[in-house]
Image: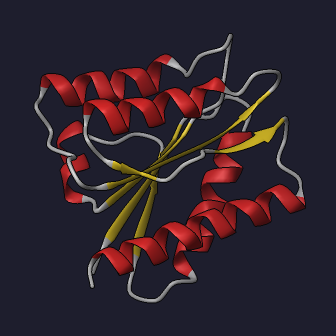
Amino acid sequence: MPKVLVIYYSRTGNTERMANAVAEGIRKVEGVEVEVKYHVDIAELANYDAIIVGTPTYHHNTVSEMKNLFENAVVKDVNLKGKIGAAFGSYGWSGEGPKLLLEIMENKFEMNVIKPPLLVKYAPDRAALEKCREFGKIIAEKLLQKDE
């Protein structure tokens, strides 16, 4: 069964709420397993067929915790080539964080990324959380199509 990791960083709870909604959407698709984590051991990344990262944007950038995740994956030579990658996050004024992570996943790790990232300004409302669920469902469906 294909496995999806939803890993996120959240200071205010906005990105955490988005992560949980993305996972709800994935769970709507039969035949796909999902785990939501705040922290993951770098070597574990290779155990997933899709990796979805959630990051807020602070000062026109992603957070250091997410940068470090991918930098450590490079150091430990974790192979993510061909895996599905996606990103989402909340922001206050600019929204670059998820875009930067997508670039890293696509260009450094040669992942098959889903573009564009899902961005929500400020706190996710009911409509934004529904977009998160749909985002998760689309990724799970793409993962199943990849396995056909």
Q: Position of residue 3 (x, y in %)?
A: 32, 69
Residue at (41% x, 22% y) in the render: 67
- Examine the rendered structure and indicate whether residue 141 appears above or below residue 74: below
Quarter-wise, where is residue 66 in the image?
top left
Residue 59 relative to residue 67: left or right: right
- Examine the rendered structure and indicate whether residue 96 appears above or below residue 21: above
| Relative depth, front residue between 101 and 113 | 113
Residue 15 relative to residue 48: left or right: right
Q: Position of residue 130 (x, y in %)?
A: 78, 66
Q: Position of residue 50 (x, y in %)?
A: 35, 59
Q: Position of residue 58 (x, y in %)?
A: 67, 17
| Relative depth, front residue between 56 and 145 | 145
Quarter-wise, where is residue 62 in the image?
top right
Residue at (27% x, 59% y) in the render: 48
Residue 72 relative to residue 11: left or right: left
Residue at (23% x, 54% y) in the render: 82
- Examine the rendered structure and indicate whether residue 126 appears above or below residue 13: below
Residue at (45% x, 23% y) in the render: 65
